């Protein structure tokens, strides 16, 4: 059976760090590169971290029904998962791993159903989340305020996921996730 693993979390929860750990730990996993209309951050590369599209290019893909799921997170700031990306990973015999926002994670779980393990990464607190986003130094103060407000709302959706992992101790979170994935892949 073709399977997918979905990681969602408020921005700054450590989701991307945990996804990278999973990719290093489980060779049968392959990262699904999402599309976005936002500008690259830091050292992000097109086709590796995201497929960076203009809003018009993204809307054209929506019209073509090219996405498994997509979301307009902020005005003209789209994120989405291409059907072709999932099909390509499955054709190689790999399990898809997603790193998506909370609404995207809920949509993917609904789409894939029992083929999916959805994991919500919970920050230790909203205050810690704000500290992490500030220390990242990739966003301005207004963007951080917006992300923190959104995070407080997103935490309310954790019950929509199969499992919640609190990331207050990275090693403990890694251990818990490793067990969850081992059990899911063996089922």
Image (tube, grey):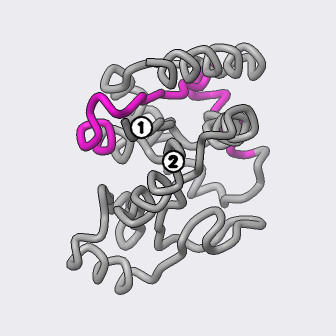
x, y percentage for residue 52?
54, 75
- In this view, 80 is above or below 109: below
User: Which of the two discs, 2 and 1, sits closer to the camera?
Assistant: 2
Task: Report if residue 13 lies within the magenta region.
Answer: no
Q: Which label sits on residue 3?
A: 1
Task: Report if residue 123 lies within the magenta region.
Answer: yes
x, y percentage for residue 115?
34, 33
Q: Which label sits on residue 93?
A: 2
C-alpha distance separating marks 2 and 1: 10 Å
User: Which residue sits at x=47%, y=73%?
Assistant: 37
- Quarter of the image with the C terminus is top left
User: Which residue sits at x=61%, y=71%?
Assistant: 47
* Highlighted magenta segment, given as a residue range: 107-134
Observer-nearest of 7 and 56: 7
x, y percentage for residue 48?
65, 66
Visible in this render: residue 64? yes
Left or right? Give the position of 89 relative to 129.
left
User: Which residue sits at x=41%, y=37%?
Assistant: 3
């Amino acid at each position: 059976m073709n399977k997918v693993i979905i990681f969602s979390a408020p921005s700054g929860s450590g989701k991307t760090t945990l996804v990278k750990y999973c990719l290093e730990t489980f060779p049968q996993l392959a990262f699904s590169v999402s599309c976005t209309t936002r500008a690259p951050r830091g050292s992000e590369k097109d086709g590796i971290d995201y497929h960076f599209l203009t809003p018009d290019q993204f809307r054209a893909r929506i019209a073509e029904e090219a996405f498994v799921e997509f979301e307009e997170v902020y005005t003209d700031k789209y994120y989405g998962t291409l059907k072709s990306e999932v099909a390509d990973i499955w054709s190689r015999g790999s399990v898809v791993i997603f790193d998506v926002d909370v609404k995207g994670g809920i949509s993917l779980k609904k789409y894939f159903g029992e083929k999916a393990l959805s994991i919500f990464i919970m920050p230790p607190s909203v205050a810690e989340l704000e500290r992490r986003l500030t220390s990242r130094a990739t966003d301005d103060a207004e963007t951080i305020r917006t992300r923190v407000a959104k995070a407080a709302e997103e935490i309310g959706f954790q019950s929509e996921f199969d499992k919640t992992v609190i990331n207050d101790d990275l090693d403990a979170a890694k251990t818990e996730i490793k067990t969850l994935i081992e059990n899911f892949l063996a089922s």
